[in-house]
Amino acid sequence: MNIQPVILSGGSGTRLWPLSREQYPKQLLKLVGDTTMLQATALRVDAMALPSGATLKRPLVVSNEEYRFITAEQLRQVDKAAESIVLEPAGRNTAPALTLAALTACLDGDDPVLVVMPADHVITNEVSFRARLAEAIKLADVGKVVTFGIVPTGPETGYGYIQHGTVLSNEKDAFQLASFVEKPDLSTAQGYLASGDYLWNSGLFILRASVWLQQIGRFRSDILVACTKAVEGGQRDADFLRPERETFLACPSDSIDYAVMEKIVTDNKGLGVVLPLDAGWSDVGAWNALLEIGAKDENGNVIDGDAILVDTKNSLVRAESRLVACVGLSDVIIVETPDAVMVAHRDAVQDVKKVVAQLKAKNRSECDAHRKIYRPWGWYDSIDMGERFQVKRIVVSPGAKLSLQMHHHRAEHWIVVTGTAMVTRGEEVFLLSENQSTYLPVGTLHRLENPGKMPLEMIEVQSGAYLGEDDIVRFEDTYGRVVK
């Protein structure tokens, strides 16, 4: 038996602004611990005790194509290079995403057990998680569709619920699925908690690839047909699998729960199984979740970064780039980044998405991207900007190179801070060392490369009438981006 971890990594997390942005969503962030949420998800199943004869495959990731390079790089950093990264041209919810994953997992004739995990959840007790996962895999191996129901710690109104039915025969702690319930109001949630029959809906699923394809074909054949055509017409590009764009864009949008799981319950054939899970789970849907699960000081505060708190209690303070000082506060969330500061009462953090909506309406860049932008070759940080000029700090990874390009509206000055740069400027190709510089006039064909084994750090000064990122004409690119 092959076990295929499937990581669904397409969310945006607008309620975690200003740390989460459209171009850098929450699964790519280090919110808990030293790894990003994506990395933690990929590592989560590593130490699991495998059934006899089972093989754990490398993760299969379904991601928006906008995040393809940073997703691949983050997995590489923790030595979890993906089996495949399936690139959705646009989000179509979790049912099409899982269908793409199941089809991809079966391309070589295999029929693995899929361990389907959202990339943006936290599980603090991974030993308990892996023990329950081993039980779920045994059930999935014989054709069951298994989900985890989180043992509730309170009458939470922000989660959907699963009602469990009778205990499965020959299983001490596995239940038939009885129903899925939408997010309740407080009194209903209190009733669920008192009954002992309800669990939080985790969004975690364990099942064979062929079982998913059979069930999605039964209940939503339109999704299966669209995804099958998209995969068959797709293209493989190194680790990336690109489904055929127009076919996938025509695919209906639906969730795993609505498309299949609820119908399995009403079908009443005993296919659906729920295992209670008590493993410190959170979907980190809003900032107060990090206050609840974080390590607290003697005043109930969770502090991350350079912060001084005086007469402050029950608050989360996260400082990314400078000192944050708080005096006489309680029950607040403060998140500071280089280009934005968010302050909210802990009971109002669900409304942070309204801030993002206003930023979008005003066409503000703070809703889309951080000041620090990641690229397949490294990253850059816009450290200053004014009328007709912009200053960037650029870091190029060892062996990486930017596209061969030119600009219609801006000239550039490059100054090497550390490392060695190989510069193409028109017909010239030359090296620059620390403290050396060069000038690239408007319209000059140019390229920057790092031929060394250490990161190349540079300062770039742009000047001109227009400094937007869309003033790039590419003639050649190592990373498959659009060229002229």
Image (spheres, grey):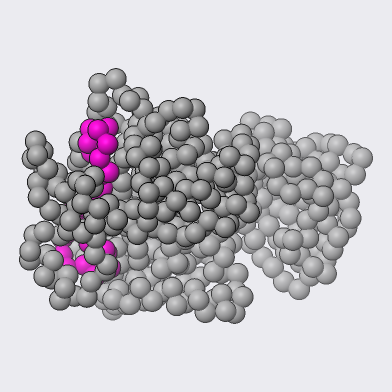
Question: Does any portion of residue 277 appear in the rendered image?
Answer: no
In this view of the protein, which residue sits in the foreground, 253 or 473? Answer: 253
Image point 27% across, 32% down: which residue?
Answer: 141
Return the residue nearer the eye: 243 or 202: 243
Residue 5, placed above or below residue 274 = above
Q: Residue furthest top?
A: 53
Q: Residue at x 37, y 56 (%)?
A: 259
Look at 15% across and 76% down and name the residue there: 187
Residue 403, image quadrant = top right
Q: Is residue 15 above or below residue 304?
A: below
In the rendered image, residue 457 lying in the magenta stretch gets the answer: no
The x, y position of residue 268, in whole percent, is 20, 51
Q: Magenta span has 158?
A: yes
Percent x, y for residue 123? 28, 48
Asked if residue 216 can be seen in this view, the reply is yes
Q: Give the percent coordinates (x, y) of residue 454.
A: 62, 35
Magenta range is 136-161
226 or 99, which lies in front? Answer: 226
> Residue 41: horizontal and vertical position, in percent?
37, 44
The quarter holding residue 296 reads bottom left
Query: How many numbered discs?
Result: 0
Residue at coordinates 46% horizontally, 33% vertically from top-left?
Answer: 106
Q: Is residue 414 left or right of residue 86?
A: right
**Does residue 174 appear to the left or right of 93 in the view shown?**
left
Q: Quadrant of the N terminus?
A: top left
Q: Is residue 34 left or right of residue 268?
A: right
Of 318 and 70, which appears nearest the observer? Answer: 70
Quarter where residue 116 is shown:
top left
